[in-house]
Amino acid sequence: MVSQETKAFFILRIMDKKNIPGLPHLQFRNIFCIGRNYVEHAKELNNEVPSQPLVFLKPTSSIIFDGDKIQIPPQSDNVHHEVELAIAIDKAGKNIPKEEALEYVGGYGIGIDVTARDIQQKAKEKGHPWTVAKGFDTFTPLSSFIEKDRIKDPQNLHLQISVNSEVRQSDSTKLMIYTIADLIHYLSTIFTLQPGDIILTGTPKGVSSITKGDNIEASLSNGLATISVTVE
C-alpha cells in the first residue's frame, strides 16, 4: 500500500519537472531512448547488435533529479542501473541531415536509465515492448544539463557510474555504434523532434543490480555533469 505522503511526493515532483535544469528556456517533452548502442553491452546481455538504432520511449513522470530517490517497485526483484549520455534538443526538426544534426542540440547531461531487468526479460521473450520495465516512477534520473558550446566533442566524453563508491560502468561515448548525429538524423525521419525532447543515447557495458539503501553517483567527463541519488 502506497502512503499518502508518497503519493503527494510523486505528484509534486511531476508538477515540478517542467523546465530542464541548466537549460531553463526548455521544458521537457518526449524521452527517446536507444537500446544496445554499445557492442559490449549488447554482448553482456546476450543480445544481437542492432542493424539500425533500437528505439523505445520513457514517460516524463519517470524523471528525478540530483538528491532524489529511486523507488524499487514491488513488481520487480531485479532492477539495474544504465548510465547514459543525455541530449536535450533545442529546436524543431524533421528529416535532419547528419551533417546538421548537432545544430539541433541544446545541451548535454548524464542520465541513468533505470531498468526492471526481470520485467524486461519477460517482455523480450514474448516480443512485447519494454515500456513497463523502463517507465516506472523515478526510473529516469537526470543531471543538470550543460550548454552544448561547453562540449568540444560529444563523441569523446567519459561516462561513469558508481554504486556505494564502487565503479560499475566507465567508458567513452566514442564507443557508440550509432553516433549522436546518426541518432538525431534517424529519430527525425520518424518523429518531428521538438525543443525539450531528450535523447538517452545508450549504455556501455557493466550494468548491474541496485538495491534499497544503495548510493549511486554518475558523472560526465570528470564532473562536467553529475548526479547523486539513493535507492529506497
Image: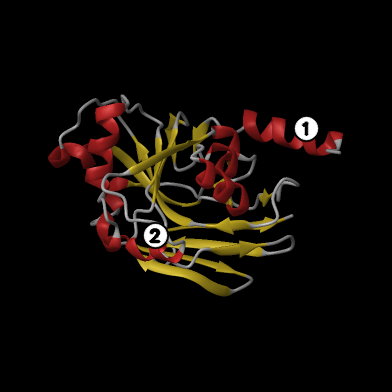
What residue does disc 1 label?
A: 8
Q: In this view, does 137 lie to the left or right of 174?
A: right
Q: Which of marks 1 and 2 is in front?
A: 2
What residue does disc 2 label?
A: 42
Whole-percent x, y for residue 15 in the image = 63, 28
Question: Could you give the CA–CA distance between mark 1 and mark 2, rounded to whole angstroms?
Answer: 38 Å
Whole-percent x, y for residue 26 in the image = 42, 31
Quarter of the image with the C terminus is: bottom right
Which residue is depicted at the point 25% across and 37% down? Answer: 186
Whole-percent x, y for residue 41 in the image = 41, 62
Q: In this view, does 159 lie to the left or right of 78?
A: left
Element on which disc 2 rests? helix
Whole-percent x, y for residue 88 in the image = 38, 39
Which residue is depicted at the point 37% across and 49% down? Answer: 201
Amino acid carrying mark 1 in the image? Ala
Amino acid carrying mark 2 in the image? Ala
Element on which disc 1 rests? helix
Q: How crowded is mark 2: few (under 14 residues within 10 Å), some or many (20 or more)?
A: some
Q: Is residue 1 left or right of residue 160?
A: right
Answer with the quarter of the image where residue 177 lies: bottom left
